[in-house]
Image (cartoon, rainbow, N blue to C red):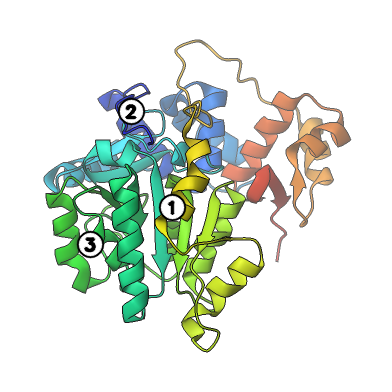
């Protein structure tokens, strides 16, 4: 039986820190990895915000980046409070523990509903929007039984398998990951289901701003949240080009277990799940297949990592020299390389390399890839 979240760990942000964190992540060219490195380098979001114009200039940009204002951040926080939601930072107690462990975890998320549900160990269940009757029934059965075993069920509020998994785990705990802002859930026909989730101490989570209408490219980001928050992800009915396969791929990259329910080779909705099993996903015919595989992973609790920690100490932020910038920039190209390789190749101190990469990043001249690799944005 997994822990049910009684052991909340983390440190709450002050109101001032929360505003600064939201401003930083909503500013131009700031992604999760850049956010964490900025705070770890400068000591706080406020100091990082002050440094952005100079970083961008030193990185070669002709104009300063757009920096979210205090009033913009405060308006979004007010909108969340009116909606009954809140913003949760990556080091705070209500932040899902498994999600904070992934590379590029969102530094701040918006959340509505029970934080207790969000911090329990989760199992992701996703699949076809155009699911079969039997597929939906089987997904619901597994969700119900895994929920009764103590797991929160995570999914994406989509039609079909997602909706069946949420509905079956209402009384045991479910969390809906949204592609748009919390106030812009999709699809419209599942709004009643979302209200039922809230009414049963469930939770919704998003990393997008309030008022953000979900676009096609936002759904893979939503899938990343499902994979990140879960200890394992189950796929029930997925065609060859299904978005559920993106969730499965991300789960594998995050070191999560991937489960799949086999189906008829004559049903196109099962081609993707059958291929997952061929490629090494765990075949599932009953809930015990999932629960037995996850049981060894539940102890001990994961240590907190990948957290952006604010510091009150003065930090040396002396800028690198132009020669160092030139050496690092010339070592980069359009092909991704690991930061450790840059350090070895240039022979420069790690602190210098990291700061120059931040400068290039804020200036919009750096691409960040998986596994901490980077490449230079090439001019057209």
Q: Mark 3 points at which residue?
A: 167
Pick whichever of labels 1 and 3 is earlier in the sequence: 3
Measured as percent of width and height from the top left, residue 219 is found at 42, 64
Identify the residue at image location x=53%, y=64%: 246
Is there any visible trace of residue 137 in the rendered image?
Answer: yes
Pick whichever of labels 3 and 2 is earlier in the sequence: 2
Q: Between 286 and 362, which is closer to the camera in this rendering?
A: 286
User: Which of labels 2 and 1 is toward the front?
Assistant: 1
Label 3 and label 2: CA atoms lie apart by 27 Å
Label 1 and label 3: CA atoms lie apart by 20 Å
Measured as percent of width and height from the top left, residue 138 is found at 35, 69
Q: Mark 2 points at which residue?
A: 93
The relative height of residue 89 versus residue 171 in the rendered view (above or below) is above
Q: How crowded is mark 1: few (under 14 residues within 10 Å), some or many (20 or more)?
A: few
Label 2 and label 1: CA atoms lie apart by 30 Å
Name the secondary structure under disc 3. Answer: helix
Q: Residue 136 vs residue 184: left or right? A: right
Measured as percent of width and height from the top left, residue 328 is found at 79, 38
Q: Between 10 and 272, which is closer to the camera in this rendering?
A: 272
User: Which of labels 1 and 3 is toward the front?
Assistant: 1
Q: Name the residue under label 1.
A: 288
Is there any visible trace of residue 178 in the rendered image?
Answer: no
Identify the residue at image location x=71%, y=61%: 379
Q: Residue 189 vs residue 150: left or right? A: left
Name the secondary structure under disc 2. Answer: loop
């Amino acid at each position: 039986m997994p822990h049910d979240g009684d052991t909340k760990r983390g440190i709450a942000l002050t109101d001032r820190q929360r505003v600064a964190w939201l401003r930083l992540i909503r500013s131009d060219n700031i992604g999760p990895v850049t956010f964490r490195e900025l705070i770890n380098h400068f000591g706080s979001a406020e100091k990082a915000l002050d440094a952005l114009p100079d970083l961008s200039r030193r990185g070669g940009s002709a104009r300063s980046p757009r920096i979210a204002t205090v009033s913009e951040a405060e308006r979004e926080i007010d909108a969340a409070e009116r909606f009954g939601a809140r913003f949760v930072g990556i080091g705070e107690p209500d932040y899902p523990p498994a999600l904070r462990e992934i590379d590029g975890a969102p530094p701040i998320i918006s959340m509505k509903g029970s934080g207790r549900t969000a911090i329990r160990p989760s199992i992701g269940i996703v699949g076809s929007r155009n699911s079969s009757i039997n597929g939906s029934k089987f997904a619901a059965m597994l969700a119900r039984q895994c929920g009764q075993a103590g797991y929160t069920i995570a999914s994406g509020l989509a039609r079909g398998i997602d909706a069946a998994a949420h509905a079956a785990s209402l009384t045991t705990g479910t969390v809906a990951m949204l592609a748009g802002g919390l106030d812009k859930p999709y699809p419209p026909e599942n709004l009643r289901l979302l209200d039922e989730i809230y009414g049963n101490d469930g939770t919704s989570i998003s990393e997008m701003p309030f008022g953000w209408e979900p676009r096609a490219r936002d759904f893979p980001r939503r899938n990343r949240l499902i994979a990140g928050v879960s200890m394992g992800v189950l796929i029930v009915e997925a065609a060859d080009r299904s978005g559920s396969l993106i969730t499965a791929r991300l789960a594998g990259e995050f070191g999560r277990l991937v489960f799949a329910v086999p189906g008829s080779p004559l049903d196109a909705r099962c081609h993707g799940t059958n291929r997952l099993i061929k490629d090494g996903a765990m075949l599932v015919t009953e809930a015990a297949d999932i629960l037995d595989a996850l049981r060894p992973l539940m102890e001990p609790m994961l240590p907190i990592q990948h957290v952006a920690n604010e510091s009150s100490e003065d930090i040396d932020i002396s800028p690198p020299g132009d020669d160092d910038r030139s050496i690092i920039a010339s070592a980069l190209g359009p092909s991704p390389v690991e930061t450790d390789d840059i350090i070895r190749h240039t022979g420069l101190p790690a602190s210098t390399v990291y700061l120059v990469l931040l400068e290039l990043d804020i200036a919009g001249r750096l691409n960040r890839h998986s596994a901490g690799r980077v490449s230079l944005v090439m001019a057209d």
